[in-house]
Each structure stands twice: as C-alpha cells, then as structure tokens.
Image (cartoon, grey):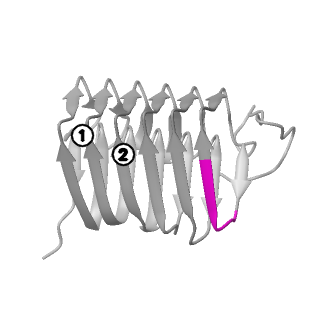
Amino acid sequence: MLFLSVASLTIKNVNFENCKTSALPDASACCGCVNCVLSYYGGAIAMLSRGSLSIANSRFENSTAYGGGAVHLWDGKSLSISSSVFQWNTAPGSSGGAVYVTGTVDTTIADSYFIGNSATTAGAVQFSEGTSSISNSIFNSNVATSSSGGAIQTDQKTALTITHSTFSSNSVRLGSYTFRIMLFL
C-alpha cells in the first residue's frame, strides 16, 4: 500500500493485487509495507494532498479498504485514470469499491474497466466535487451493498460527463440506482 502526501505521482504499468489497509481486521499490507498502521482509505493507494495522481496501464485487483477499495484521493488537484483495470476491489465500510475521490478534484477516466467491485455506496466510483469525465470505459457487475450507486455516485458539487461507455449488470442490494447523482437546488 502506498500512503502518500506528495505534489504529484504517476503510476504506469503496475499491478496491485490483494492490497488491504491494515486498519481492517485480518488485513495485510502489500507493496513493500509489512504490518503498517496506515489509513482506512485506499487499499493500494491513498494520496492526501493538493497534488495530481496519474494512473495508466495498471491493474488493481482484490484490494480492500474501509473506503476507496483500491484508490483514495483526498483533496487532490487532479486524477487521471487511463487504460487500467479495477477488478474485485471492496470498500465494505464506505464508498467507492474501486475509487473514492473526495474534495474538489478534476477527474478523468478513459479506456478503463471496472468489474465486480463493491462498496456500501458507489460500487465502483465515488466523486464528491469537481469536474469529472468518463469515456470509453466499461462498468460491469459492480455492487452497492447498502443504499445507492451500483456503479457511480456523485455528490451535489460534481459536474459529470459520460461518453461512449457501457454499464451492465451493476446493482444495489438494498436501494436503487445504477447511478446516483444528488442535486440540491
């Protein structure tokens, strides 16, 4: 698990498998950190800064964290995900089975796959603020185990654009909505 507070980080051609935050029961850290007490968020990557995170040609598989099963970007400047796979990641206590973005963050997701991820809300991706775009991506079999957002959930301050993407077999166990976009007028 990478726990960072840096200006920018670029991840290319990296596989993260079976990463877990050690704050969870029976959790084991990965990626060079053994028995570390880190964060509840971001099973593979937790980045807390006004910096930028770029992920390309990478795979996040079977990672677990309280929120942001694979990746959590807290109050960053920008997040770019391209040509990457997020599969079987979980966030059993919060949002974003694969990715959890909090704060005003400009997010771009392109040519990526989100398959079989789960969280309490937002089975695959949670956005909280900022401008976000998703293009040429596939969201399949993601699950929100509690209330909403089988694939995606946004909060009231997110401008979201989705183009040329496929959403199939995403579900919510106790509520509704493949997408949940909250509007406060």
In the picture, measured across the screen, residue 160 lies left or right of residue 90, that is: left
Residue corresponding to mark 2 = 109
Question: Between residues 136 and 140, which one lies in front from this camera angle?
Answer: 136
Kindly tell me whether residue 173 is visible in this rendering. Answer: no
Percent from the top left, x then y, of residue 79? 46, 56
Distance from Cα at disc 1 to Cα at disc 2: 26 Å
Please report the residue visible at 17 percent of the width from the left and 36 percent of the height from the top: 164
Residue corresponding to mark 1 = 175
First in sequence, mark 1 or 2: give its number.
Answer: 2
Looking at the rendered image, the quarter that the N terminus falls into is: top right
Please report the residue visible at 26 percent of the width from the left and 30 percent of the height from the top: 171
**Figure check: 11 above or below 143:** below
Percent from the top left, x then y, of residue 83? 42, 33
Residue span colored magenta: 5-10
In the picture, measured across the screen, residue 56 lies left or right of residue 20, that is: left
Kind of residue indicated by mark 1: Gly
Percent from the top left, x then y, of residue 105? 42, 66
**Figure check: 82 above or below 46:** above
Please report the residue visible at 41 percent of the width from the left and 24 percent of the height from the top: 116
Please rate how many residues cluster around mark 1, counting C-alpha atoms within 10 Å: few if below 14, some from 14 to 19, many from 20.
Answer: some
**Figure check: 117 above or below 36:** above
In the picture, measured across the screen, residue 1 lies left or right of residue 104, that is: right
Q: How many marks?
A: 2
Kind of residue indicated by mark 2: Ile
Check disc 1 and report its element: helix, strand or loop. loop
Please report the residue visible at 57 percent of the width from the left and 67 percent of the height from the top: 51
Looking at the rendered image, the quarter that the C terminus falls into is: bottom left
Q: Check whether the beta carbons of the residues at disc 1 and disc 2 lie within 8 A of each other.
A: no
